[in-house]
Image: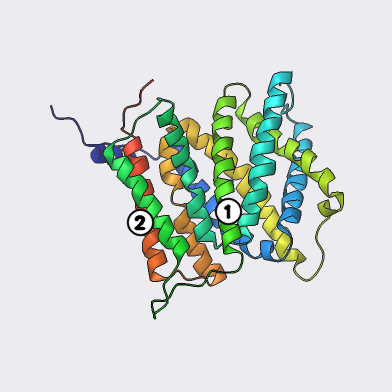
Amino acid sequence: MSPESPRSTLLSRLSSGPMRKGTLAAWVVVLLWGFHYVVLYRPLRLIDPERYLILRFSWAALLVLLFSLFFPVLKGISRENWRKLLLLSLVGIVAYQWVFLKAASLLDPVTLVLILSLGPVLVALYGHAKGHESFSPLQWGAMALIGAGIYLVVHGELPQDGSAPASLPGQGEGLIMAVLSLLFFTLWTLMTREMSGRVSTLQLTLVPVLLGGVILVPLHPSWVLPPVGPHAGLVILSLMYSIVFALFLAYYLWNVAVADIGPARAGLWTNGQPVVAAAGSALFLGHKMGSLQLVGGLVAVVGYWLFFGKEQSAPRRK
């Protein structure tokens, strides 16, 4: 009996039986996180990104503290795990979110989401280097496609006269911040995996947010107050979406997806974020991608799907 091809195995898994809750959760995460890049675009050009950071996590920390009054979120954590959660907060909340919001204030949403989509690939490469998993030639080729696609998106549309395109103001700094975001996100993911067996999923999601707020608020206490001015309403609406949907709900659903269908398959679906960001940017921000950028985005998304689709059936070494 001939073995099934990786592609047929993947398609049979995705199409057979009723939709699993983890798949539905991953699809919702794609919508919430993909649209988050659009929601952040205008507010981060109206107020300082550092102020937005402190507003977001001071308010989120207050919500976690109120939640802990009714549910035992802070109980049963050992002193060693408190130290590890503090380190996780420093990397994933303070460092990552700081440079991420700075990058979001300087870059187009599609460019940023494609760069950060390299995070799961870097985690997989780390696993390869440590001997936990191996890649097929198709997956190595998919990585090359991803890199080529992101290059085309970042490079932008060439002018009709063939001259070199002019860099947008702050684009260079934004790309540096995006790369730092990618590195911090990858480290955060690896640390989260290591902590997943030490504390509950709820504690792993909420406690770093609380600690991050405690660290950030003393840096500029007056920034925790709601913004005022003609654009205050837009900023507050963005904060509400960022806290309730992109932070709490999305991370909860992400944990549901990983627990139900596994991190590789969940990662396959979440690589649809660039599509959501591109559609949202066109509909709500009036941004249109040039032909080279459009081709690059499609190439990158195909590369992600080839890489993570193969991941579903690729054997792993223990």
CA separation in Å, label 1 and label 2? 23 Å
Residue 223 picture quarter: bottom right
Query: Where in the figure is residue 167, as x and y percent of width and height?
Result: 53, 69
Label 1–label 2 contact, CB within 8 A: no
Query: Where in the figure is residue 7, as x and y percent of width and height?
Result: 26, 41
- Point 47% across, 46% down: residue: 118
The three-letter code of the residue at mark 2 reads Val
1 or 2: mark nearer the eye: 1
In the drawing, does residue 163 fall left or right of residue 54? left
Query: Residue 244 bears which disc, if any?
Result: none
- Dot 1 falls on a residue whose secondary structure is helix
Query: Where in the figure is residue 172, as x and y percent of width and height?
Result: 57, 61
Asked if residue 76 can be seen in this view, the reply is no
Q: Residue furthest right?
A: 222
Decide: is 26 above or below 151. Answer: above
- Point 81% across, 57% down: residue: 226
Q: How is the image coloured?
A: rainbow
Disc nearer the start of the sequence (1/2)? 1
Query: Where in the figure is residue 261, as x and y percent of width and height?
Result: 43, 34
The three-letter code of the residue at mark 1 reads Ile
Question: 53 and 91: which one is in front?
Answer: 91
Query: Residue 176 bears which disc, if any?
Result: 1
- Point 64% across, 50% down: residue: 99
Residue under numbered circle 2? 299
Question: 5 and 18: which one is in front?
Answer: 5
Decide: is 86 above or below 151. Answer: above
- Dot 2 falls on a residue whose secondary structure is helix
Q: Residue furthest bottom?
A: 161
Quadrant housing the C terminus: top left
Decide: is 14 above or below 86. Answer: below
